[in-house]
Amino acid sequence: MWKQVSEDFWAQNRSSKVDQVNDTVKDIIEQVRKDGDKALIELAEKFDKIKLKSVAVTRNDIDEAYSKVSQDIVDELENAAYNIQRFHQMQKPAGLWLTEVEPGITLGVKTTPLERVGCYIPGGRASYPSTVLMTAIPAKVAGVDEVIMFTPAPANPITLVAADIAGVDEIYYSGGAQAIAAMALGTESVEPVQKIVGPGNVFVTAAKMMLRDKVDIDFPAGPSEVAVLADKYADVEFVAVDLVAQAEHDPSSACLLVTDDPTLPDRVWPIMEKFINETPRKEIIEKAMNNSGYIIADDLDLAIEIMNEIAPEHLSIQTRDPLDTLSKVRNAGSIFVGPYTPVAAGDYASGTNHVLPTAEHAKTCSGLNVMAFMKTSTVQYLTKGGLAALAPTVETLANAEGLYAHGASVKARKSDE
């Protein structure tokens, strides 16, 4: 079960399976486009085996959810929400900044939040109230006017409570590709959104990719993955439990150990095996082990280069000098530094975001953050003197490109005495 693998194995193993479901997703999108709420209700019965009278979640539904959730869970959701809000508030840029770069030439940037965004919260094998906090709170920090949420029915009461704590404005029952279609296209009950964020299965990812002409998305996101970069000084138990922890998400999840210590994999596996046999999600983890393994590098620098090529969703650094190792990392969704920084801390409580790019997309994509819910406009403000200073450059280059009206727009202002 625990095996040595190559970089190619990891890349092939994490490649998207989106093409395999495209026909099904196209049909679902067309059904939602044509039938709206009726399609969502029919598809909920078909895929989730539940009969809905309406897709909208009411205030009474949320109040009832609170009655089913213990106060200690509510308290810790609020604690996690505070940490997430605090961290994302630090990312928020100034709404407008202006700087006079030369006399009469003032430049700047105006940052504006989106008006309406949608959060997709998976259901299925597990519920993810933490993902509600991770998607909705940054949007609210950014200043988004309306944040809506879709999740398969029946939702775990904790998910509805988390949505209320996060300030979600509208909640709807629908999962899979049909939920993405509803947010992108709109239905009788749902106004379309400008952007959709949140993880999901291959059907969700395929729908997000297909509907990018209608709505912006965060990034392609697949099953959870973790890679641990460790040397001979790593605590074997810490390495083992971090690998197993992410594997329990889904049978398609994956965990990878990259090390320069050839003895480490054999020392880690017995502890992993013990954890696997003791966990209630043993069957899921055992299947995830088929997507997992270890790579032995000749030295730590090569191990780091391998990790940069893999670009994992979660990267745990457990080396003798983890900060030095961190300085050499280029590609990772979220990085967990040192032996006392489990990936689970970022999943729930530290405040960083756990909605992250997978399948090597960390080479080009960032994890979810406040700027994902904002857009920028450049600003320029010139005085007459400032324009005069720029005029030779503008006129010369405009004429060189044959765009004489561009040059004339400057010349007209120069002659305005």
Image (cartoon, grey):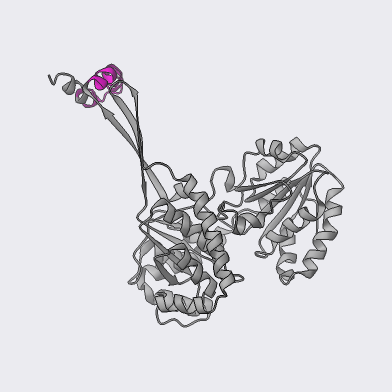
Image quadrant in which the C terminus is located: top left
| Residue 21 appears in view | no
The residue nearer to you, when weighing 401 against 90, is 90
| Residue 196 appears in view | yes
Q: Position of residue 196 (x, y in %)?
A: 44, 58
Q: Position of residue 52 (x, y in %)?
A: 44, 81
Q: Residue at x 84, y 43 (%)?
A: 261
Query: Does residue 327 lie above or below 16 as drawn?
Result: above
Q: Main secondary structure of the magenta part?
A: helix
Q: Residue at x 80, y 55 (%)?
A: 237
Span shown in magenta: 385-408
Q: Residue at x 60, y 54 (%)?
A: 350
Q: Residue furthest left?
A: 417
The residue nearer to you, when weighing 23 against 192, is 192
Query: Does residue 405 lie above or below 165 as drawn?
Result: above
Left or right placement of residue 243 versus residue 107 in this view: right
Q: Residue at x 26, y 21 (%)?
A: 386
Image quadrant in which the N terminus is located: bottom right
Magenta stretch holds residue 370 = no
